[in-house]
């Protein structure tokens, strides 16, 4: 038993066991640091991902008969790290975070005491942190912290699912017993995340009852189309249950007009005597920008300059209406730079939870005692990690201004990238508004973006340009260890001149996400693209000749 106890932290806090644990931490930190190279994306050497790679993993796997020494455990773990992408200055692909030190420490404390977020008796640290960050962030976005509530859950997608569940239960409280009514409809923009798609599948509402709404040029939901489609559903006897207002689309950072959506749903409610339509603000990508909601643009304490100032000011005008939504989410593991999973689902009115909470009779193990007063019987998880602790630690370490600086820099770097790229490469079009993300599209000869947008060129030609970009994505993808750009096969949808078919546009993505993507790096990103494009065009010519 003594040997087994050695696998655990001490009971009495003795120096020896702590030194032991510390020495393991030190080894791990040192070895990972040794693998870092600022000129590469990856830690150490990438394993060879041959076709039978995972087959070989499957064959080799066995629980060892006897435990191995900790040194060997660490060695094996570090083998897994070999070739791992590391979100340094070379990573400009997606909203992947480089967890900040405070969040790592928050996570560590969470693990060391290993509380269960389910019940404060089993996880007091997690419970208090959850209540605290819920209040902090409610105040940030303009929810009344005495009425709102929130909990950490399984990602931005989990927040969408949880919000849909609340919407169903609020509209039809008996649905928990009798099943989901058949005439419910959900609405989202055609550029929204597939989270709602999965949620209508899983709740039984069905994908046919998810209505996609067209978008405007700025990638926000077109409210005329929304109105038309909601009216159509109502005319056919359907119930408009739920609108997903995306604030920061995943690929292009389009921001839906929440005030407009709220105005529209209220108008329809009055006109047709409807129950309130549930609005969830999908702020998984954009939520962090509410940190500018209270920024004083007159005084401009951070000395934000020119276009950075302008962009953030327009964000404030949009994000200040988030408090009109019934719920929203903070996905800290995207722009907030914390480890997976740190998503806080915020609900404007905690009363709504009564529709989904479990009866005390159904929870014989926890929550129904005189002790403990925080029991999250309404979550879809039972046991929950206390990830609010990572969020809490980050909020303390950054403060509002720290996050503002980080978030403003994403915009600054994007502005510079756009300018320099269009200067250096005449055959490129920037295809979205300024945001932490730049989407761009190359053309074999001249730029035809305006024609594509206005439905002036043929489906074949658009698809040819898509193919050109797809091939180029392969070329730069092979070199992603130098700079890793993202790409998307549905940056937006356009009409063709010769067909009624709607066509998805392919684009490359530059996502400034790491604190190490700075102004000093922009020339390198642009140079990488220009060189590879020149090479690609040359090899293409040779093939064509
Ligand atoms: C990323 C994203 C999601 C999903 O969030 P996860 O945390 O990955 O589950 C949902 N909606 C939008 C707009 C997103 O960008």
Image: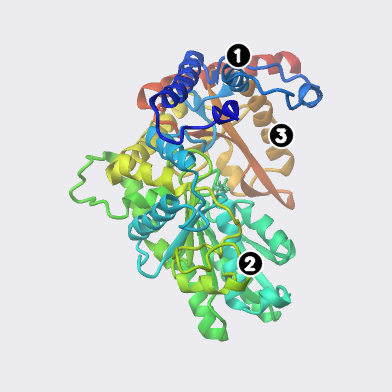
> How many C-alpha atoms fall within 10 Å of the one at disc 3: few (<14), some, or many (≥20)?
some
| Whole-number angstrom distance, CA of label 1 to CA of label 2 | 47 Å
Q: Quadrant of residue 54?
A: top right
Task: Compare residues 508 and 244 and report the one nearer the observer.
Answer: 244
Question: Sequence order check: which comes first, mark 3 or mark 1?
Answer: 1
> Mark 3 near ligand 1 (CB under 8 Å)?
no
Q: Judge whether residue 192 can be spotted in this image.
A: no
Q: In the rendered image of this protein, does residue 42 appear above or below residue 486?
A: above
Q: Is the C-beta separation of discs 1 and 2 under 8 Å? A: no
Report the residue marked by disc 3: 464
Is 170 left, or right, of 523 in this rendering?
right
Q: Is label 1 in a helix, a strand or a loop? A: loop
Q: Quadrant of the C terminus?
A: top right
| Whole-number angstrom distance, CA of label 2 to CA of label 3 | 35 Å
Question: Sequence order check: which comes first, mark 1 or mark 2?
Answer: 1
> Mark 1 near ligand 1 (CB under 8 Å)?
no
Report the residue marked by disc 1: 45
Mark 1 vs mark 2: give the one in front: 1
x 68%, y 39%: residue: 462
Q: In the rendered image of this protein, does residue 63 appear above or below residue 288?
A: above
Report the residue marked by disc 2: 186
Residue 484 in percent (x, y) is at 55, 25
């Amino acid at each position: 038993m003594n040997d087994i106890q050695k696998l655990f932290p001490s009971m009495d806090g003795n120096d020896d066991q702590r030194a032991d644990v510390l020495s393991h931490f030190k080894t791990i930190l040192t070895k990972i640091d040794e693998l870092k190279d600022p000129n590469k994306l990856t830690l150490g050497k990438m394993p060879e991902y041959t076709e039978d790679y995972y087959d070989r993993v499957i064959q080799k796997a066995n629980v060892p008969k006897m435990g191995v020494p900790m040194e060997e455990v660490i060695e094996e773990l570090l083998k897994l790290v070999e070739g791992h992408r590391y979100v340094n200055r070379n990573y400009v692909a997606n909203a992947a975070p480089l967890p900040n030190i405070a969040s790592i420490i928050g996570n560590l404390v969470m693990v060391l005491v290993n509380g269960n977020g389910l019940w404060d008796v089993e996880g007091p640290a997690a419970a208090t942190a959850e209540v605290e960050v819920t209040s902090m962030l409610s105040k940030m976005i303009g929810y009344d912290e005495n009425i709102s509530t929130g909990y950490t859950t399984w990602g931005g997608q989990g927040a969408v699912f949880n919000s849909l569940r609340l919407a169903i239960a609020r509209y039809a409280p008996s649905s928990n017993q009798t099943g989901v009514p058949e005439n419910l409809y959900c609405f989202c923009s055609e550029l929204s995340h597939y989270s709602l798609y999965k949620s209508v599948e899983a709740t039984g509402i069905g994908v046919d009852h998810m209505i996609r709404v067209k978008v405007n040029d700025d990638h926000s939901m077109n409210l005329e189309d929304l109105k038309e489609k909601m009216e159509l559903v109502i005319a056919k006897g359907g119930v408009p249950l739920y609108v997903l207002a995306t604030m920061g689309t995943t690929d292009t950072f389009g921001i839906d007009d929440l005030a407009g959506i709220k105005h529209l749903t209220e108008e329809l409610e009055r006109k047709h005597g409807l129950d309130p339509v549930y609005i969830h603000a999908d702020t998984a990508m954009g939520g962090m920008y509410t940190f500018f909601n209270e920024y004083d643009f007159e005084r401009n304490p951070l000395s934000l300059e020119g276009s950075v100032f302008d962009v953030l000011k327009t964000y404030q005008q949009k994000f200040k209406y988030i408090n009109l939504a019934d719920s929203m989410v903070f996905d800290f593991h995207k722009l907030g730079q914390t480890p997976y999973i740190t998503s806080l689902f915020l609900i404007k009115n905690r009363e709504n939870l009564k529709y989904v909470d479990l009866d005390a009779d159904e929870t014989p193990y926890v929550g129904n005692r005189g002790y403990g007063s925080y029991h999250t019987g309404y979550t879809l998880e039972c046991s929950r990690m206390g990830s609010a602790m990572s969020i809490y630690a980050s909020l303390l370490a950054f403060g509002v201004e720290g996050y503002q600086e980080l978030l403003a820099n994403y915009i600054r770097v994007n502005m510079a990238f756009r300018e320099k790229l269009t200067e250096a490469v005449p055959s490129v079009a920037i295809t979205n508004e300024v945001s932490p993300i730049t989407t761009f599209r190359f053309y074999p000869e001249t730029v035809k973006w305006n024609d594509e947008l206005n439905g002036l060129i043929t489906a074949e030609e658009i698809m040819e340009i898509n193919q050109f970009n797809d091939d180029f994505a392969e070329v730069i993808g092979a070199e992603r260890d130098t700079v890793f750009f993202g790409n998307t096969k549905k940056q937006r949808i356009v009409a063709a001149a010769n067909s009624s078919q709607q066509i998805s546009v392919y684009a490359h993505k530059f996502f400034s996400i790491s604190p190490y993507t700075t102004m000093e790096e922009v020339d390198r990103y642009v140079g990488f693209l220009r060189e590879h494009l020149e090479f690609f065009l040359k090899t293409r010519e040779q093939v064509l000749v």
